[in-house]
Amino acid sequence: MTIDSQSRFEIIRQMAVDGTHGEDFNNVAYTALAQTATSANLKAAALILWDEKREPTLTVSFAAEEADKDKLLTLEKDLYDTLRRNRQLSSAYMSFDGQVPLHSFTLPLKYRDQSFGAVIGLQEGTQSIISENVFLEALTALLALNYAAASATKEITIPREALDQERLGGIVETAITVNHEVNNPLTAILGNVQLLLFKRDDLDDELKQKLKVIEESALKIKDITKRLMHITTPKSVEYTKGTTMLDLSDDSEQDGKSGSSV
């Protein structure tokens, strides 16, 4: 059984209206799942939110019978969740043979390329749910937008860890660029300076001192790019009033200094 155009429109319309009216996200999700399940003849449908460790924080589900909901959530636990953790699964439509054919899908909830949950569904019969892939993708995207809108009004808070992870991704990308574009010429500078210092008997004291300053500065730049590559928890410090910068201080050195103070 496919969803007719009128039903698709009504489901999407209701979600949009509820979202703009600031309706509780759990209620919006449940209504959307129930309407979709009824229109598409799904035995069960569920929305799952998770934290940065992929541990579920919220599950909203609708099922014709409790056994159908258990079957769907077992499929999520045994198959979809495992594939997401081990194989970076994003979305899938699957069919299973048997006395009664089963069809299932999982689609990600994403906001700014950050995945924070999924919508899953279960259907029985010969008609594959993949025929509704365009509608289901639109449904999932709108649920993600409703979630983001609820987060903006602080009804639901996007985990701080998820935001930090997105920020860390940008830092890592910058660090790789810096290491590639800076470290290559820096290695050449450092190598030549150290070679000149190795022949210090042929140099006057003033030139030796200037070369030593260049060597120390080059080593400092190299250390900074190394710290940038090894950031695991982004922290900011004030640079000037109203402006912050990434904190690249050595925590171990700071701990040592604080520990030795009286």
Image (tube, rainbow, N blue to C red):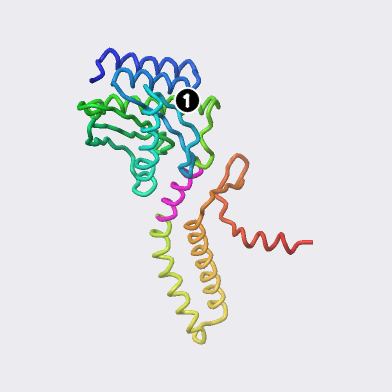
Query: In percent of the image, x 25 and y 15: which residue is there?
Result: 5
Please indicate whether residue 54 sits to the left or right of residue 84 in the image.
right
In the figure, 223 relative to 143: above or below?
below
Q: Quadrant of the N terminus?
A: top left
Q: Residue furthest bottom?
A: 201
Q: Residue furthest left?
A: 126
Compare residues 233 and 38 and report the one nearer the observer. 38
Residue 165 horizontal/vertical position (percent): 48, 45
Residue range corresponding to the magenta coloring: 164-176
User: Is 170 part of what is drawn in magenta?
Assistant: yes
Please indicate whether residue 127 sits to the left or right of residue 147 in the image.
left
Residue 144 horizontal/vertical position (percent): 41, 29
Quadrant of residue 179 in the image? bottom left
Q: Amino acid at mark 1?
A: Ala
Quadrant of residue 117 in the image? top left
In the figure, 257 relative to 122: above or below?
below
In the figure, 251 relative to 62: above or below?
below
* Main SS category, magenta section: helix
Compare residues 66 and 111 and report the one nearer the observer. 66
Q: What residue would you read off at disc 1?
A: 149
In the figure, 38 relative to 85: above or below?
above
Q: Quadrant of the C terminus?
A: bottom right
Residue 115 horizontal/vertical position (percent): 41, 38
Query: In percent of the image, x 47 and y 57: which residue is there?
Result: 229
Compare residues 205 and 153 and report the one nearer the observer. 153
Badge 1 marks a residue whose secondary structure is helix
Crowd class of label 1 (few under 14; some 14 to 19; many from 20; radius 10 Å): some
User: Is 223 part of what is drawn in magenta?
Assistant: no
Q: Residue furthest right?
A: 262
Query: In percent of the image, x 31 and y 15: which residue is there?
Result: 9
